[in-house]
Amino acid sequence: MQVLRVNTETGLIHYEAVPEHWQRLGGRALVARFLLDEVPPTCEPLGPNNKLIWAPGLLVGHMLSSLDRISVGGKSPLTGGVKEANAGGTTGLKMIWLGLHSLIVEGGPAADGRWQILRVGLDGASLEDAGDLAGLGLKETAMQLLNRYGPKIGISAIGPAGERLYRTAGITHIDKDRNLTRISARGGLGAVMGCKRLKAIVFDNPKPHRPPLADKTLFRDASARYLQGLREHPQTSEIYTLYGTAAMVNFCNSQGGMPTRNFSAGSFEDAEAIGGEAIKELNTERGGEIAHACMPGCIIRCSNLYAGPDGETLVTPLEYETIGLMGSNLGLNDPDVIAKMNDIANDMGMDTIDTGAALGVAAEAGLMAFGDGSRALELMEEVRQDTPLGRIIGNGAGLAGKILGVIRVPVVKNQALSAYDPRAIKGTGVTFATSPQGADHTCGLTIRAQVDHTDPAGQAKLSQGVQYSMAGYDSLGACIFSGSGLGADEAIVSDLINGRYGWGVGPDYLQHLGRETILMEREFNRRAGFTNADDRLPEWMTGEAIAPTHTVFDVPDADLDAMFRPES
Protein backbone atom coordinates (compact mmCIF):
# COMPACT_ATOMS: atom_id res chain seq x y z
CA MET A 1 0.00 0.00 0.00
CA GLN A 2 1.18 3.50 -0.83
CA VAL A 3 0.36 7.15 -0.27
CA LEU A 4 -0.40 9.11 -3.44
CA ARG A 5 0.51 12.78 -3.11
CA VAL A 6 -0.71 15.33 -5.67
CA ASN A 7 0.09 19.04 -5.84
CA THR A 8 -2.55 20.80 -7.93
CA GLU A 9 -0.46 23.97 -8.10
CA THR A 10 2.82 22.54 -9.36
CA GLY A 11 1.46 19.42 -11.03
CA LEU A 12 3.87 17.25 -9.06
CA ILE A 13 2.53 13.72 -8.46
CA HIS A 14 4.36 10.99 -6.63
CA TYR A 15 3.85 7.83 -4.63
CA GLU A 16 5.52 7.32 -1.28
CA ALA A 17 5.74 4.75 1.46
CA VAL A 18 3.21 4.91 4.26
CA PRO A 19 4.83 6.57 7.29
CA GLU A 20 5.31 4.06 10.08
CA HIS A 21 3.08 5.95 12.52
CA TRP A 22 0.27 6.00 9.93
CA GLN A 23 0.30 2.27 9.25
CA ARG A 24 -2.19 1.35 11.97
CA LEU A 25 -4.51 4.24 11.17
CA GLY A 26 -7.33 4.63 8.68
CA GLY A 27 -10.42 6.73 8.10
CA ARG A 28 -11.10 9.36 10.75
CA ALA A 29 -8.08 8.45 12.89
CA LEU A 30 -5.77 8.92 9.93
CA VAL A 31 -7.39 12.26 9.11
CA ALA A 32 -6.65 13.49 12.63
CA ARG A 33 -3.04 12.29 12.56
CA PHE A 34 -2.52 13.76 9.08
CA LEU A 35 -3.82 17.16 10.14
CA LEU A 36 -1.51 17.26 13.15
CA ASP A 37 1.42 16.18 11.01
CA GLU A 38 0.96 18.29 7.90
CA VAL A 39 -1.61 21.10 8.16
CA PRO A 40 -0.80 24.33 10.04
CA PRO A 41 -3.68 24.65 12.52
CA THR A 42 -3.99 28.41 12.04
CA CYS A 43 -3.80 28.34 8.25
CA GLU A 44 -6.48 29.85 6.04
CA PRO A 45 -8.75 26.88 5.23
CA LEU A 46 -9.20 28.09 1.65
CA GLY A 47 -5.54 28.88 1.16
CA PRO A 48 -2.71 26.80 -0.32
CA ASN A 49 -1.46 25.57 3.07
CA ASN A 50 -4.58 23.54 3.75
CA LYS A 51 -4.60 19.99 2.43
CA LEU A 52 -7.16 17.29 1.79
CA ILE A 53 -6.78 13.60 2.49
CA TRP A 54 -8.84 10.67 1.22
CA ALA A 55 -8.51 7.90 3.81
CA PRO A 56 -10.27 4.53 3.49
CA GLY A 57 -11.07 2.89 6.82
CA LEU A 58 -9.02 0.04 8.22
CA LEU A 59 -11.51 -2.66 7.17
CA VAL A 60 -12.21 -1.33 3.68
CA GLY A 61 -11.59 -3.55 0.69
CA HIS A 62 -13.37 -6.82 1.43
CA MET A 63 -16.91 -5.83 0.36
CA LEU A 64 -18.06 -6.78 3.84
CA SER A 65 -21.45 -5.20 4.43
CA SER A 66 -21.31 -1.53 5.40
CA LEU A 67 -17.54 -1.53 5.97
CA ASP A 68 -16.23 0.17 2.82
CA ARG A 69 -16.67 3.85 3.65
CA ILE A 70 -14.28 6.63 2.69
CA SER A 71 -13.22 9.48 4.96
CA VAL A 72 -12.18 12.84 3.52
CA GLY A 73 -10.50 15.34 5.79
CA GLY A 74 -8.88 18.74 6.06
CA LYS A 75 -9.21 21.96 8.01
CA SER A 76 -12.83 23.07 7.82
CA PRO A 77 -13.65 26.45 6.29
CA LEU A 78 -16.97 26.27 8.17
CA THR A 79 -15.77 25.50 11.70
CA GLY A 80 -12.12 26.56 11.45
CA GLY A 81 -11.10 23.25 13.02
CA VAL A 82 -10.63 19.59 12.32
CA LYS A 83 -12.97 18.05 9.79
CA GLU A 84 -13.55 14.46 8.75
CA ALA A 85 -16.56 13.70 6.57
CA ASN A 86 -17.25 10.13 5.51
CA ALA A 87 -19.54 8.59 2.93
CA GLY A 88 -20.55 5.38 1.21
CA GLY A 89 -20.23 4.77 -2.49
CA THR A 90 -17.28 3.07 -4.17
CA THR A 91 -14.38 5.47 -3.57
CA GLY A 92 -12.88 3.63 -0.60
CA LEU A 93 -13.14 0.26 -2.31
CA LYS A 94 -11.53 1.52 -5.54
CA MET A 95 -8.68 3.13 -3.62
CA ILE A 96 -7.81 -0.03 -1.72
CA TRP A 97 -8.01 -2.13 -4.86
CA LEU A 98 -5.66 0.38 -6.51
CA GLY A 99 -3.17 -0.15 -3.69
CA LEU A 100 -3.71 3.23 -2.05
CA HIS A 101 -3.49 3.64 1.70
CA SER A 102 -4.42 7.31 1.26
CA LEU A 103 -4.50 10.17 -1.21
CA ILE A 104 -3.28 13.67 -0.34
CA VAL A 105 -4.13 16.76 -2.39
CA GLU A 106 -2.11 19.87 -1.60
CA GLY A 107 -1.12 23.27 -2.96
CA GLY A 108 -3.23 25.95 -4.54
CA PRO A 109 -4.73 26.18 -8.02
CA ALA A 110 -2.63 25.86 -11.13
CA ALA A 111 -0.89 29.06 -12.16
CA ASP A 112 -3.23 29.58 -15.10
CA GLY A 113 -6.29 28.99 -12.92
CA ARG A 114 -7.56 26.06 -14.95
CA TRP A 115 -9.90 23.42 -13.54
CA GLN A 116 -8.40 19.94 -13.37
CA ILE A 117 -9.33 16.29 -13.04
CA LEU A 118 -7.08 13.88 -11.18
CA ARG A 119 -7.13 10.46 -12.83
CA VAL A 120 -5.82 7.55 -10.76
CA GLY A 121 -5.11 4.10 -12.20
CA LEU A 122 -2.95 1.05 -11.65
CA ASP A 123 -0.35 2.57 -13.98
CA GLY A 124 -0.14 5.85 -12.10
CA ALA A 125 -1.93 9.17 -11.81
CA SER A 126 -2.21 12.30 -13.94
CA LEU A 127 -3.82 15.73 -13.90
CA GLU A 128 -6.06 16.46 -16.89
CA ASP A 129 -7.99 19.48 -18.06
CA ALA A 130 -11.53 19.87 -16.74
CA GLY A 131 -12.50 23.17 -18.33
CA ASP A 132 -15.53 21.61 -19.99
CA LEU A 133 -16.86 20.47 -16.59
CA ALA A 134 -16.59 23.78 -14.77
CA GLY A 135 -20.00 25.03 -13.66
CA LEU A 136 -21.77 21.74 -14.27
CA GLY A 137 -24.02 20.15 -11.70
CA LEU A 138 -23.11 16.73 -10.41
CA LYS A 139 -25.64 14.88 -12.58
CA GLU A 140 -24.10 16.24 -15.76
CA THR A 141 -20.60 15.89 -14.31
CA ALA A 142 -21.20 12.19 -13.68
CA MET A 143 -22.57 11.67 -17.19
CA GLN A 144 -19.59 13.37 -18.80
CA LEU A 145 -17.02 11.48 -16.72
CA LEU A 146 -18.70 8.11 -17.23
CA ASN A 147 -18.82 8.71 -20.98
CA ARG A 148 -15.19 9.80 -21.04
CA TYR A 149 -13.59 7.20 -18.78
CA GLY A 150 -15.97 4.25 -18.73
CA PRO A 151 -19.06 3.06 -16.83
CA LYS A 152 -17.31 1.39 -13.91
CA ILE A 153 -15.02 4.14 -12.63
CA GLY A 154 -15.04 5.59 -9.16
CA ILE A 155 -15.61 9.33 -8.81
CA SER A 156 -15.14 11.98 -6.13
CA ALA A 157 -16.32 15.37 -7.35
CA ILE A 158 -17.63 18.78 -6.41
CA GLY A 159 -20.62 20.61 -7.81
CA PRO A 160 -21.16 24.35 -8.30
CA ALA A 161 -21.29 24.85 -4.51
CA GLY A 162 -17.69 23.70 -4.20
CA GLU A 163 -16.60 25.76 -7.18
CA ARG A 164 -18.17 28.86 -5.57
CA LEU A 165 -16.50 28.06 -2.22
CA TYR A 166 -19.80 27.75 -0.35
CA ARG A 167 -19.13 26.62 3.19
CA THR A 168 -21.92 24.03 2.85
CA ALA A 169 -20.13 22.34 -0.07
CA GLY A 170 -19.28 18.68 0.26
CA ILE A 171 -17.34 16.16 -1.81
CA THR A 172 -19.59 13.66 -3.55
CA HIS A 173 -18.82 10.05 -4.44
CA ILE A 174 -20.45 7.77 -6.97
CA ASP A 175 -22.28 4.65 -5.79
CA LYS A 176 -22.48 1.16 -7.24
CA ASP A 177 -25.39 2.21 -9.50
CA ARG A 178 -23.62 5.29 -10.89
CA ASN A 179 -25.49 7.84 -8.78
CA LEU A 180 -23.10 10.66 -7.90
CA THR A 181 -24.94 11.48 -4.65
CA ARG A 182 -22.97 9.90 -1.77
CA ILE A 183 -21.62 12.97 -0.09
CA SER A 184 -18.91 13.67 2.44
CA ALA A 185 -21.17 16.52 3.36
CA ARG A 186 -20.21 18.37 6.47
CA GLY A 187 -17.79 21.16 7.16
CA GLY A 188 -17.26 22.67 3.70
CA LEU A 189 -14.56 20.32 2.42
CA GLY A 190 -15.96 20.75 -1.11
CA ALA A 191 -14.89 24.38 -0.89
CA VAL A 192 -11.35 23.27 -0.02
CA MET A 193 -11.33 21.09 -3.15
CA GLY A 194 -12.79 24.01 -5.09
CA CYS A 195 -10.14 26.47 -3.95
CA LYS A 196 -7.57 24.13 -5.49
CA ARG A 197 -9.69 24.13 -8.66
CA LEU A 198 -9.91 20.35 -8.66
CA LYS A 199 -13.29 19.43 -10.11
CA ALA A 200 -13.09 15.67 -9.81
CA ILE A 201 -10.99 12.62 -9.04
CA VAL A 202 -11.54 9.60 -11.29
CA PHE A 203 -10.48 6.20 -10.01
CA ASP A 204 -10.04 3.55 -12.69
CA ASN A 205 -11.85 0.26 -12.25
CA PRO A 206 -9.29 -2.33 -11.10
CA LYS A 207 -10.03 -6.00 -10.75
CA PRO A 208 -11.21 -6.94 -7.24
CA HIS A 209 -8.09 -7.08 -5.12
CA ARG A 210 -9.06 -7.79 -1.54
CA PRO A 211 -6.26 -7.03 0.91
CA PRO A 212 -4.29 -9.99 2.30
CA LEU A 213 -5.39 -11.51 5.58
CA ALA A 214 -3.06 -12.32 8.46
CA ASP A 215 -5.45 -15.00 9.72
CA LYS A 216 -8.10 -16.03 7.18
CA THR A 217 -9.94 -18.32 9.56
CA LEU A 218 -10.26 -15.68 12.26
CA PHE A 219 -11.33 -12.98 9.81
CA ARG A 220 -13.93 -15.17 8.13
CA ASP A 221 -15.33 -16.37 11.43
CA ALA A 222 -15.62 -12.81 12.72
CA SER A 223 -17.20 -11.75 9.41
CA ALA A 224 -19.82 -14.48 9.74
CA ARG A 225 -20.67 -13.41 13.30
CA TYR A 226 -20.87 -9.79 12.19
CA LEU A 227 -23.23 -10.56 9.31
CA GLN A 228 -25.34 -12.76 11.55
CA GLY A 229 -25.65 -9.86 13.98
CA LEU A 230 -26.87 -7.58 11.19
CA ARG A 231 -29.38 -10.18 10.00
CA GLU A 232 -30.76 -10.81 13.47
CA HIS A 233 -31.12 -7.20 14.60
CA PRO A 234 -34.53 -5.75 13.68
CA GLN A 235 -33.14 -2.31 12.91
CA THR A 236 -30.73 -3.56 10.24
CA SER A 237 -32.73 -6.49 8.93
CA GLU A 238 -36.20 -4.97 8.83
CA ILE A 239 -36.69 -1.34 9.87
CA TYR A 240 -33.97 0.40 7.86
CA THR A 241 -34.31 -2.01 4.94
CA LEU A 242 -38.05 -1.41 4.63
CA TYR A 243 -38.31 2.24 5.63
CA GLY A 244 -34.80 3.64 5.27
CA THR A 245 -33.50 6.25 7.66
CA ALA A 246 -36.87 8.01 7.37
CA ALA A 247 -37.97 5.48 9.99
CA MET A 248 -36.41 7.88 12.49
CA VAL A 249 -39.05 10.56 11.84
CA ASN A 250 -41.82 9.12 13.99
CA PHE A 251 -39.40 7.81 16.61
CA CYS A 252 -37.64 11.15 17.07
CA ASN A 253 -40.95 12.99 16.96
CA SER A 254 -42.29 10.77 19.74
CA GLN A 255 -39.28 11.75 21.87
CA GLY A 256 -39.99 15.45 21.39
CA GLY A 257 -36.71 15.91 19.54
CA MET A 258 -37.88 16.59 15.96
CA PRO A 259 -36.57 19.99 14.80
CA THR A 260 -39.65 22.03 13.96
CA ARG A 261 -39.86 25.59 12.59
CA ASN A 262 -36.24 26.52 13.19
CA PHE A 263 -35.94 24.45 16.37
CA SER A 264 -38.76 26.32 18.09
CA ALA A 265 -40.59 23.06 18.88
CA GLY A 266 -39.70 19.39 19.24
CA SER A 267 -42.71 17.74 17.65
CA PHE A 268 -44.23 18.25 14.21
CA GLU A 269 -47.95 17.81 13.81
CA ASP A 270 -47.54 16.39 10.29
CA ALA A 271 -44.66 14.04 11.08
CA GLU A 272 -46.53 10.98 9.83
CA ALA A 273 -46.86 12.53 6.37
CA ILE A 274 -43.07 12.68 5.99
CA GLY A 275 -42.18 9.56 7.99
CA GLY A 276 -40.78 6.25 6.84
CA GLU A 277 -44.09 4.45 6.49
CA ALA A 278 -45.67 7.20 4.38
CA ILE A 279 -42.62 7.55 2.16
CA LYS A 280 -42.36 3.79 1.64
CA GLU A 281 -46.03 3.54 0.68
CA LEU A 282 -45.84 6.50 -1.69
CA ASN A 283 -42.57 5.37 -3.23
CA THR A 284 -43.83 1.82 -3.73
CA GLU A 285 -47.02 3.04 -5.43
CA ARG A 286 -44.94 5.10 -7.85
CA GLY A 287 -42.49 2.33 -8.69
CA GLY A 288 -39.57 3.79 -6.81
CA GLU A 289 -36.91 1.63 -5.20
CA ILE A 290 -36.64 0.84 -1.52
CA ALA A 291 -33.93 -1.35 0.03
CA HIS A 292 -31.18 0.21 -2.09
CA ALA A 293 -27.52 -0.26 -1.18
CA CYS A 294 -25.00 2.54 -1.58
CA MET A 295 -22.01 0.19 -1.30
CA PRO A 296 -21.34 -3.16 -2.97
CA GLY A 297 -22.09 -6.01 -0.59
CA CYS A 298 -24.29 -4.05 1.86
CA ILE A 299 -27.14 -6.16 3.25
CA ILE A 300 -28.79 -3.37 5.28
CA ARG A 301 -29.80 -1.42 2.16
CA CYS A 302 -31.16 1.60 4.03
CA SER A 303 -31.11 3.85 0.97
CA ASN A 304 -33.81 4.49 -1.61
CA LEU A 305 -34.55 5.93 -5.03
CA TYR A 306 -37.52 8.19 -4.32
CA ALA A 307 -39.89 8.51 -7.27
CA GLY A 308 -42.11 11.44 -8.20
CA PRO A 309 -45.72 11.26 -9.39
CA ASP A 310 -44.56 10.37 -12.92
CA GLY A 311 -42.61 7.37 -11.66
CA GLU A 312 -39.25 8.96 -12.44
CA THR A 313 -36.67 9.23 -9.67
CA LEU A 314 -36.89 12.60 -7.93
CA VAL A 315 -33.87 12.08 -5.69
CA THR A 316 -31.58 9.46 -4.27
CA PRO A 317 -31.36 9.08 -1.37
CA LEU A 318 -34.12 10.77 0.66
CA GLU A 319 -32.72 10.54 4.18
CA TYR A 320 -33.93 11.36 7.70
CA GLU A 321 -31.55 14.26 8.26
CA THR A 322 -32.77 15.96 5.10
CA ILE A 323 -36.41 15.30 6.02
CA GLY A 324 -35.77 16.84 9.44
CA LEU A 325 -33.90 19.97 8.34
CA MET A 326 -35.67 20.61 5.02
CA GLY A 327 -39.03 19.26 6.17
CA SER A 328 -40.24 19.72 9.74
CA ASN A 329 -37.63 22.41 10.40
CA LEU A 330 -39.33 24.47 7.69
CA GLY A 331 -42.84 23.35 8.59
CA LEU A 332 -43.12 21.37 5.32
CA ASN A 333 -45.22 18.21 5.11
CA ASP A 334 -44.94 17.30 1.42
CA PRO A 335 -42.28 14.64 0.68
CA ASP A 336 -42.16 15.71 -2.97
CA VAL A 337 -41.20 19.27 -2.05
CA ILE A 338 -38.51 18.01 0.31
CA ALA A 339 -37.24 15.64 -2.39
CA LYS A 340 -37.03 18.45 -4.95
CA MET A 341 -35.06 20.62 -2.54
CA ASN A 342 -32.83 17.66 -1.77
CA ASP A 343 -32.25 17.07 -5.49
CA ILE A 344 -31.12 20.66 -6.00
CA ALA A 345 -28.73 20.36 -3.05
CA ASN A 346 -27.40 17.05 -4.39
CA ASP A 347 -26.76 18.49 -7.84
CA MET A 348 -25.06 21.51 -6.28
CA GLY A 349 -23.01 19.26 -3.98
CA MET A 350 -24.29 20.77 -0.71
CA ASP A 351 -24.84 19.56 2.84
CA THR A 352 -28.62 19.35 3.27
CA ILE A 353 -28.29 19.73 7.04
CA ASP A 354 -26.57 23.11 7.03
CA THR A 355 -28.56 24.25 4.01
CA GLY A 356 -31.85 23.28 5.67
CA ALA A 357 -30.81 25.01 8.88
CA ALA A 358 -29.92 28.16 6.90
CA LEU A 359 -33.37 28.07 5.30
CA GLY A 360 -34.88 27.82 8.78
CA VAL A 361 -32.95 30.92 9.80
CA ALA A 362 -34.16 32.66 6.62
CA ALA A 363 -37.75 31.77 7.58
CA GLU A 364 -37.14 33.13 11.09
CA ALA A 365 -36.01 36.35 9.42
CA GLY A 366 -39.25 36.56 7.43
CA LEU A 367 -37.85 35.60 4.03
CA MET A 368 -40.31 32.71 3.79
CA ALA A 369 -43.31 31.56 5.75
CA PHE A 370 -42.95 28.26 7.58
CA GLY A 371 -44.93 25.70 5.63
CA ASP A 372 -44.57 27.48 2.27
CA GLY A 373 -43.06 24.83 0.01
CA SER A 374 -43.17 27.02 -3.11
CA ARG A 375 -41.12 29.70 -1.40
CA ALA A 376 -38.67 27.12 -0.05
CA LEU A 377 -38.07 25.90 -3.60
CA GLU A 378 -37.66 29.51 -4.75
CA LEU A 379 -34.93 30.00 -2.14
CA MET A 380 -33.18 26.84 -3.33
CA GLU A 381 -33.30 28.27 -6.84
CA GLU A 382 -31.66 31.41 -5.47
CA VAL A 383 -28.85 29.15 -4.26
CA ARG A 384 -28.64 27.46 -7.64
CA GLN A 385 -28.51 30.83 -9.43
CA ASP A 386 -25.85 32.19 -7.04
CA THR A 387 -27.79 35.33 -6.14
CA PRO A 388 -26.65 37.33 -3.09
CA LEU A 389 -29.37 35.69 -0.99
CA GLY A 390 -28.44 32.31 -2.45
CA ARG A 391 -24.84 32.83 -1.37
CA ILE A 392 -25.94 33.65 2.16
CA ILE A 393 -27.92 30.41 2.40
CA GLY A 394 -25.17 28.47 0.63
CA ASN A 395 -22.67 29.49 3.27
CA GLY A 396 -24.66 27.93 6.09
CA ALA A 397 -26.85 28.76 9.05
CA GLY A 398 -24.18 30.56 11.07
CA LEU A 399 -23.46 33.17 8.42
CA ALA A 400 -27.16 33.47 7.56
CA GLY A 401 -27.94 34.29 11.19
CA LYS A 402 -25.30 37.01 11.34
CA ILE A 403 -26.37 38.68 8.11
CA LEU A 404 -30.11 38.34 8.65
CA GLY A 405 -30.04 39.40 12.31
CA VAL A 406 -31.41 36.17 13.79
CA ILE A 407 -30.52 35.00 17.31
CA ARG A 408 -32.09 31.53 17.19
CA VAL A 409 -29.34 29.96 15.06
CA PRO A 410 -28.84 26.21 15.65
CA VAL A 411 -25.07 25.84 15.30
CA VAL A 412 -22.09 24.67 17.33
CA LYS A 413 -18.63 25.67 16.16
CA ASN A 414 -20.57 27.34 13.32
CA GLN A 415 -21.87 23.97 12.06
CA ALA A 416 -25.61 23.30 12.04
CA LEU A 417 -27.21 20.84 14.43
CA SER A 418 -28.46 17.58 12.95
CA ALA A 419 -32.14 16.63 13.25
CA TYR A 420 -32.27 15.90 17.01
CA ASP A 421 -33.18 18.71 19.36
CA PRO A 422 -30.61 18.62 22.19
CA ARG A 423 -33.05 19.90 24.81
CA ALA A 424 -35.08 16.71 24.48
CA ILE A 425 -32.20 14.31 23.72
CA LYS A 426 -29.52 15.67 26.01
CA GLY A 427 -26.84 13.05 25.45
CA THR A 428 -26.81 13.94 21.77
CA GLY A 429 -26.74 17.57 22.86
CA VAL A 430 -23.51 16.81 24.73
CA THR A 431 -22.14 15.30 21.54
CA PHE A 432 -23.15 18.37 19.54
CA ALA A 433 -21.42 20.60 22.09
CA THR A 434 -18.19 18.71 22.65
CA SER A 435 -17.38 16.87 19.43
CA PRO A 436 -14.29 18.40 17.83
CA GLN A 437 -16.13 18.10 14.50
CA GLY A 438 -18.91 20.56 15.38
CA ALA A 439 -22.55 19.59 15.80
CA ASP A 440 -22.95 16.19 14.14
CA HIS A 441 -25.16 13.27 15.15
CA THR A 442 -22.83 10.75 13.49
CA CYS A 443 -20.22 11.63 16.12
CA GLY A 444 -22.35 10.18 18.92
CA LEU A 445 -26.11 9.73 18.68
CA THR A 446 -27.65 8.64 21.99
CA ILE A 447 -31.36 8.49 21.15
CA ARG A 448 -31.59 4.70 21.40
CA ALA A 449 -30.01 4.51 24.85
CA GLN A 450 -32.38 3.28 27.55
CA VAL A 451 -32.24 6.43 29.68
CA ASP A 452 -34.40 9.42 30.52
CA HIS A 453 -33.19 11.69 27.74
CA THR A 454 -34.48 14.82 29.48
CA ASP A 455 -32.52 14.22 32.70
CA PRO A 456 -29.12 15.97 32.54
CA ALA A 457 -27.52 13.50 34.96
CA GLY A 458 -25.18 11.01 33.32
CA GLN A 459 -25.58 12.43 29.81
CA ALA A 460 -21.94 13.45 29.49
CA LYS A 461 -20.73 9.95 30.35
CA LEU A 462 -23.23 8.43 27.93
CA SER A 463 -22.11 10.74 25.14
CA GLN A 464 -18.45 10.10 25.86
CA GLY A 465 -18.77 6.35 25.34
CA VAL A 466 -20.79 6.72 22.17
CA GLN A 467 -18.38 9.33 20.81
CA TYR A 468 -15.47 6.96 21.34
CA SER A 469 -17.33 4.14 19.59
CA MET A 470 -18.32 6.30 16.64
CA ALA A 471 -14.82 7.69 16.19
CA GLY A 472 -13.65 4.08 16.18
CA TYR A 473 -16.27 3.04 13.62
CA ASP A 474 -15.34 6.01 11.41
CA SER A 475 -11.72 4.88 11.56
CA LEU A 476 -12.67 1.34 10.52
CA GLY A 477 -14.68 2.58 7.53
CA ALA A 478 -17.89 1.35 9.17
CA CYS A 479 -21.36 2.75 8.54
CA ILE A 480 -23.18 4.13 11.58
CA PHE A 481 -25.64 1.23 11.30
CA SER A 482 -22.93 -1.44 11.35
CA GLY A 483 -22.89 -1.28 15.14
CA SER A 484 -25.82 -3.72 15.21
CA GLY A 485 -23.43 -6.33 13.86
CA LEU A 486 -20.07 -5.18 15.19
CA GLY A 487 -21.53 -5.09 18.69
CA ALA A 488 -23.11 -8.55 18.49
CA ASP A 489 -20.27 -9.80 20.67
CA GLU A 490 -17.37 -7.95 22.24
CA ALA A 491 -14.68 -9.71 20.19
CA ILE A 492 -15.94 -9.09 16.65
CA VAL A 493 -14.06 -5.84 16.05
CA SER A 494 -10.79 -7.07 17.53
CA ASP A 495 -11.10 -10.38 15.67
CA LEU A 496 -11.66 -8.58 12.37
CA ILE A 497 -8.62 -6.37 12.96
CA ASN A 498 -6.44 -9.27 14.13
CA GLY A 499 -7.63 -11.45 11.26
CA ARG A 500 -6.86 -8.69 8.78
CA TYR A 501 -3.58 -7.38 10.22
CA GLY A 502 -2.39 -9.71 12.99
CA TRP A 503 -1.92 -6.84 15.44
CA GLY A 504 -3.01 -8.71 18.56
CA VAL A 505 -5.43 -6.06 19.78
CA GLY A 506 -7.87 -6.75 22.61
CA PRO A 507 -11.64 -6.33 22.96
CA ASP A 508 -11.22 -2.71 24.14
CA TYR A 509 -9.62 -1.79 20.80
CA LEU A 510 -12.61 0.14 19.40
CA GLN A 511 -12.94 2.45 22.40
CA HIS A 512 -9.16 2.93 22.59
CA LEU A 513 -8.96 3.81 18.88
CA GLY A 514 -11.90 6.19 19.20
CA ARG A 515 -10.49 7.94 22.25
CA GLU A 516 -7.07 8.42 20.65
CA THR A 517 -8.76 9.81 17.54
CA ILE A 518 -10.79 12.36 19.47
CA LEU A 519 -7.78 13.44 21.55
CA MET A 520 -5.83 14.07 18.34
CA GLU A 521 -8.75 16.06 16.93
CA ARG A 522 -9.01 18.14 20.08
CA GLU A 523 -5.29 18.83 20.00
CA PHE A 524 -5.56 20.16 16.45
CA ASN A 525 -8.46 22.37 17.49
CA ARG A 526 -6.54 23.58 20.54
CA ARG A 527 -3.66 24.61 18.31
CA ALA A 528 -6.18 26.34 16.02
CA GLY A 529 -7.40 28.43 18.98
CA PHE A 530 -10.41 26.51 20.29
CA THR A 531 -11.18 26.59 24.03
CA ASN A 532 -13.83 25.16 26.37
CA ALA A 533 -16.05 28.07 25.37
CA ASP A 534 -16.41 26.47 21.93
CA ASP A 535 -17.82 23.30 23.51
CA ARG A 536 -21.20 24.83 24.17
CA LEU A 537 -24.66 24.76 22.64
CA PRO A 538 -26.23 28.08 21.62
CA GLU A 539 -27.10 30.08 24.72
CA TRP A 540 -30.77 30.33 23.77
CA MET A 541 -31.09 26.56 24.08
CA THR A 542 -30.17 26.79 27.76
CA GLY A 543 -33.01 29.23 28.47
CA GLU A 544 -35.72 28.59 25.90
CA ALA A 545 -37.75 25.50 26.82
CA ILE A 546 -38.99 23.27 24.06
CA ALA A 547 -42.43 21.65 23.77
CA PRO A 548 -43.58 18.99 24.35
CA THR A 549 -40.89 18.06 26.90
CA HIS A 550 -40.73 21.62 28.30
CA THR A 551 -37.02 21.22 28.92
CA VAL A 552 -33.94 23.31 28.29
CA PHE A 553 -30.40 22.07 27.77
CA ASP A 554 -29.07 22.01 31.30
CA VAL A 555 -26.15 19.58 31.33
CA PRO A 556 -23.63 21.42 33.54
CA ASP A 557 -20.69 23.14 31.88
CA ALA A 558 -18.44 21.30 34.32
CA ASP A 559 -19.62 17.98 32.88
CA LEU A 560 -18.85 19.19 29.36
CA ASP A 561 -15.40 20.45 30.32
CA ALA A 562 -14.48 17.17 32.03
CA MET A 563 -15.41 14.99 29.05
CA PHE A 564 -11.98 14.35 27.59
CA ARG A 565 -9.61 15.03 30.45
CA PRO A 566 -6.91 12.36 30.88
CA GLU A 567 -8.63 10.90 33.95
CA SER A 568 -12.10 10.83 32.33
Image: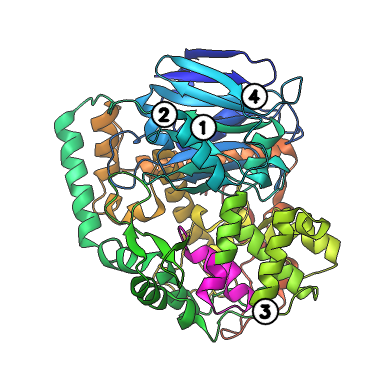
Name the residue beneath numbered marker 1: 54
Which amino acid type is marked by label 4? Glu
Cα distance, mark 4 to mark 1?
12 Å
Task: Tell me if 288 is positioned left or right of 548 in this view.
Answer: left
Which of the two labelled residues, at mark 2 and mark 3, occupies the earlier sequence position?
A: 2
Is 99 left, or right, of 353 in this rendering?
Answer: left
Give the CA distance from mark 2 to mark 4: 18 Å
To which quarter of the image does residue 372 belong? bottom right
**Disc assigned to residue 301:** none
Dot 2, crowdedness within 10 Å: few (<14), some or many (≥20)? Answer: many
Give above or below for 521 relative to 291.
Answer: above
Q: Secondary structure at mark 2?
A: helix
How many numbered callouts?
4
Is residue 148 shown above or below 566?
above
Return the residue at label 4.
106
Question: Alpha carbon of mark 4 to alpha carbon of mark 3: how far?
Answer: 43 Å
Q: Is residue 419 visible?
A: no
- Residue at image position (60%, 68%) is 326
Q: Secondary structure at mark 3?
A: loop
Residue 525: image quadrant is top right
For badge 3, the amino acid type reads Asp
Q: Which residue is mark 3?
A: 372
Name the residue beneath numbered marker 2.
Answer: 95
How many residues crowd mark 1 within 10 Å: few (<14), some (14–19), many (20+)? many
Label 2 with label 1: CB-CB less than 8 Å? yes
* Residue 117 position (above or below residue 456): above
User: CA gap, disc 2 to disc 3?
Assistant: 44 Å
Q: Earlier in the sequence, mark 1 or mark 3?
A: 1
Callout 1 secondary element: strand
